[in-house]
Every structure is written in C-alpha cells, then in structure tokens.
Amino acid sequence: MSKLNRRRFLKGTLGGGAITLGLPLLDVFLNDNGTAYADGTPIPLRFGTWSWGLGMSEAVFVPKQTGPHFDLPEEISPLAAVQQHINLYTNFHVFKDDAPNLCHHSGWVVLRSGIAPMTRENRPGETIDVAVARKIGNATRFRSLSATATGDVRDSFSYEGGNSVNAPEWSPLRFYQRLFGEDFQDPNADSFTPDPRVMVRKSALSAVQEEARKLEKSLGAADRARLDQYFTGLRDLERRFDLQLSKPDPLEACVVAPAPADLPSGLDANLVSTRHRLMTDLMLMAVACDQTRVFNMFYASAFSATTKPGYDKPHHTATHEEAVDTELGYQPNTSWFTRRAMEEWAHFVNALATFPEGDGTLLDNAFVYATTDQSFAKIHAIDGIPMFSAGSAGGRVRTGLHIDGAGTPGCRLGYTAQRLMGVDIESWGSKSNTTSSEIGEILV
C-alpha cells in the first residue's frame, strides 16, 4: 500500500457544497520507522526548560561515578525511575568576572543568557529559549509558553531583554482557558471554519500596518527603530492570525481534557507539587496539540519560599539559618526541599517519557534544559551549579550520563542546546563564560 500524505482529506459534497474531513495522525502517514511523516517531513523537535531554586547539598547530590549507570546519592534518589532519560552535569562553573555576585540572580542569568549581570535589575542579552523560539517556534500558535508552579506571575527565567520578561501562566485554570478556550482550533475536529473574529482582527491589523508604513517615511532614525520594534510584534501577531485561519494538521496525541479546578494561593510544598503537576499536564497537551514547540516550566523561584509542613522556615530562609549537621554533612531540612524539587523534576521527565508520539514519545523528540540559581545556597556559591538535560532531541543526544565539567563554563550546555535546535551560532556567552565547545560526550 502506498503512503498517504498527512494533509490528505476525505472529500465529498453536502447540500450542493464541497466538504472536507481531516484524518487523525495514522501510522500510514509516517515513514517505516515511525520517526517522520511519509513525505519526509520530520516529527517536530521541541525545546523546553525547567527550573528549581537554591541549588543542592553537594555531599548528597553529586554522584561519585561519571558516565553511564552513575550512582544516585540521597538528594537525587527520586530520579531513579527516569535516570535513563536524563543527563546530569556537575563541576561546571559560572564566572562573574568584573560583575558582582548578585545573590540568587547571577547564576541563573549567566546560564540562561551567557552574560554576567551588573545589577539585579540588569537582564543582559536574551535567554536561550527566546533564541530557540525564534528558530523553531514560528509555525505554532504560540512561539513559546511559560508556566510557574509558584502561583506568582513574577517568577520567570525567560526574557527577551531587560524590560521584556516573558510572564508565565500561574493559574492552571487560566492556563487551560488560554490554551483551549474559544480561540483554540482542534486539529482533530471533523470540520474547520475560520473564526470570523480573527478575520476581522487580521483585516484591521493590515490596515494599521499600512498606515504605519506611511508614517515611517516622516520619522527620524530613532523613531523608525522604535516603529520597527513595533512592527516585529505586529508581524508575530499576524503570523498567529494566519495559523488560526488555516486548518491544522490532525494530531492523534492531541486529546483535550476537561478544564481543571483552580487552586488556592500558597506555597506549601504539597500545594506547589499539585500546581506543578497540573501545569505539566497542560503544557504537554499544548505541545502534543502543536500549540507550541518551545516551553518553560518553573517549579520554584531563586528565592524559593516553599514551606515544609511542621517546619517553621521557608526554603530560602532555611538555606541560610539552618546549621550543617556535623554527622550528616548537610542541612537536613534544606535538603528536604531539594529532594521535593527532584521528585517534581522526575515527574516532569516521566510525563514526557510516557506521552506517546509516533513510534516513540514526546521526550524522544525534545531536549529539556534544567537549571537552578546557586550551587551551595548558604554561601551564595555559583561555582559548580548543577544542571540537567532530558530527552534525546530526535536521536541526537545520548542520555543516562553524569558529566563532570572539570571547571569549564556552564554555558557549554546552553550552547550545545542551541546548536541542537539549529540556532546558527559559532560561540555563546561573554568574557570568561564564552564558549564554542559543545558537550561532546552527549552527542551521537
């Protein structure tokens, strides 16, 4: 039997008019290996980030073994079920050079942007998810999506520039409504009717752009630059309108669940976990429905205020005020918070790894980059900040490895991630954080 095109529709007539009916993502639409569409178009590659706050307790976090089958010390023991899907990176450094060590800020900013910030308000460059979204995010309704389990819209490790932070979704119910509300076009619907409201919006937008072009001729250089920035936003909006006016390709994995119940505010660890898992389910469905190919999930902030039942200090306070237990060699309550974070990282990875797509899973066609803000938070250390990745990026990444960075720049992982996603850069980072060295041990 010959392969069918994934854009094949069932055609017929009804009441004298032509109708078309979309088909789901059948095996016949795929190649013999189930790794691409029959016409050679690859299953989309996705990029994600995941964040946790306040680092680790090195004595019970960093494995003694490198390479495959590494040991899992107490703090990362929750990762046992997903160890084969992840890589752990330790002994990679963040360099501040002539910049100050801004507590709970410098570390994550360097790892996400490649540049050491000079002030807390300073967000230099752009984060890697923005660069990747510009490369692979233009064919979807949302160029990228961000969500946080903290319930605080201010918690984000994603920005396009100093004054342009990508605010995350903080409520599961609001996130659901944004994704699957009245503007959502179900790719598996029996029929497709362009939304007349979108058509009107696009027509109005075109008229505005025409007027703006006329205005541009009468402006000075500075105003033309501002107008060009404005145009960039308009073009992105018009791109999204175009997508909403086109019948999306059928996607077998796209099954929209009922709306979740909203959750109360608060940072009790159990509530944060519940919120994180609801947000994870929604984010993965957004990816499966090809609403986005770039996503950010934020478990806990750099100044994490997550609370432990029966303990009087929130996480951040505990890192500074709790003594290191001389027998254990670490701060037991602080370590409890990190272990909860690792449980949630394991849940996030497992959710991707068990979500079927083609002959594999969403995780097979993704690369997720996970970072924190400090190594040892008690002294605001930024050397040896641990990092993770998950997923094989379409078969291009080996997983299940512990990599010792030997003091080389932590930006090497961000550089590797961008190269995997097709971002055309010869190097990344500034001053001592600059690198043009991929982490070759993980590359196939």
Image (spheres, rainbow, N blue to C red):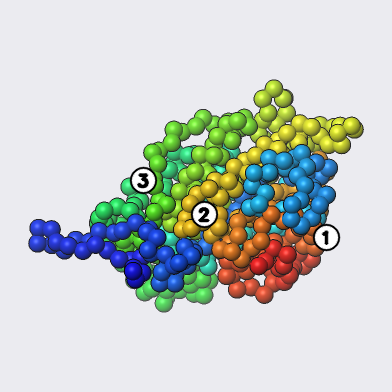
Residue 213 x %, y %: 38, 73
Seen in the image, is 196 located left or right of residue 430?
left
- Report whether 182 appears left or right of 442: left
Local SS, label 1: loop
Q: Say what secondary structure mark 2 lies in.
A: strand
Q: Are marks 2 and 1 in contact (CB under 8 Å)?
A: no
> Residue type at mark 2?
Thr
Q: Position of residue 338 (x, y in %)?
A: 71, 39
Residue for badge 1: 407
| Structural distance between the alpha carbons of marks 3 and 2 | 26 Å
Could you tell me which residue is drawn at 49 percent across and 43 percent down? 281
Structural crowding at the residue carrying mark 1, measured as other residues with C-alpha within 10 Å and reported as few (<14), some (14–19) or many (≥20): few
Q: Is residue 188 above or below residue 10?
A: above
Looking at the rendered image, the disc whose residue lies closer to the viewer, 2 or 1, is 2
**Image quarter of the C terminus:** bottom right
Q: In the image, which disc is placed on residue 181?
A: 3
Picture disc at residue 361: 2
Where residue 376 appears, as percent x and y from the top left, is 80, 45
